[in-house]
């Protein structure tokens, strides 16, 4: 593990923890295996399956962010990260296996950062495709609350244009 990567991620996250270590090690592996660095735009995309501490490492070390459109949250709850390189089409999914040989927090963190990579992660190809690049949408005013939302988040209900918050979905239990 490169000490400078760890220090940069800790500075962004605010403290050391095993969860951050998962993200740092995932970044380090992605950088090494895919030959990538910090993204300037959307050339590197990460789809994270969790919203835990490790995602801060993805943001700080790989330059992936929700605002830039190259960090996408897919809420499976799994400690898994899929990385995509838009320039060459390469993709890699890392799944954290967990640490079962100790309950000590510091030992877990050390193992995640320094243990044999094949004992820390399972490697596979993501089962989903690279998402399209971020788009800019026209903002539409909701006829109920008068707040604007992007056109792809607007609904037609009772003859009115309404936002997600004002929309009352029709559901009969299917």
Image: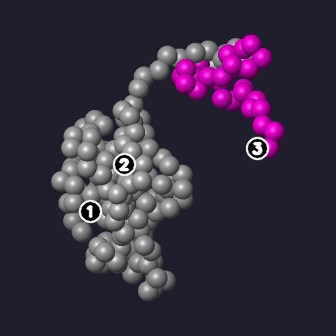
Please give the residue where the numbered disc 2 appears in the rendered image. 46
Q: Nearer the viewer, mark 2 or mark 3?
A: 3
Q: Is 172 in the magenta?
A: yes
Disc sitting over residue 174 in the figure: 3
One can see residue 57 in this view? no
Q: Earlier in the sequence, mark 2 or mark 1?
A: 1
Residue 74: horizontal and vertical position, in percent? Answer: 50, 49
Specify the quadrant that holds the N terminus.
bottom left
Do the residues under discs 2 and 1 have CB atoms within 8 angstroms? no
Q: Earlier in the sequence, mark 3 or mark 1?
A: 1
Residue 108: horizontal and vertical position, in percent? Answer: 41, 78
Classify mark 3: helix, strand or loop: loop
Q: Which residues are magenta?
A: 148-174
Q: Is residue 99 above or below residue 64?
A: below
Disc sitting over residue 159 in the figure: none
Depth order, front residue of 53/124:
124
Quarter-of-image position of residue 136 = top left
């Amino acid at each position: 593990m490169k000490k400078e990567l760890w220090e940069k991620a800790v500075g962004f996250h605010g403290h050391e923890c095993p969860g951050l270590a998962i993200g740092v090690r995932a970044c380090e592996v992605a950088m090494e295996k895919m030959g990538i660095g910090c993204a300037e735009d959307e050339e590197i995309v990460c789809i994270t399956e969790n919203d835990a501490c490790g995602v801060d490492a993805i943001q700080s070390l790989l330059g992936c962010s929700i605002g830039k459109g190259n960090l996408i949250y897919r809420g499976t709850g799994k400690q898994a990260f899929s990385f995509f390189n838009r320039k060459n089409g390469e993709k890699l999914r890392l799944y954290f296996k967990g640490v079962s040989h100790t309950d000590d927090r510091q030992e877990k963190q050390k193992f995640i950062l320094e243990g044999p990579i094949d004992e820390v992660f399972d490697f596979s190809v993501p089962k989903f495709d690279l998402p399209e690049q971020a788009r800019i949408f026209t903002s539409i005013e909701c006829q109920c609350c008068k707040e604007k939302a992007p056109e792809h988040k607007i609904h037609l209900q009772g003859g009115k244009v309404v936002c997600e918050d004002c929309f009352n979905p029709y559901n009969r239990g299917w």
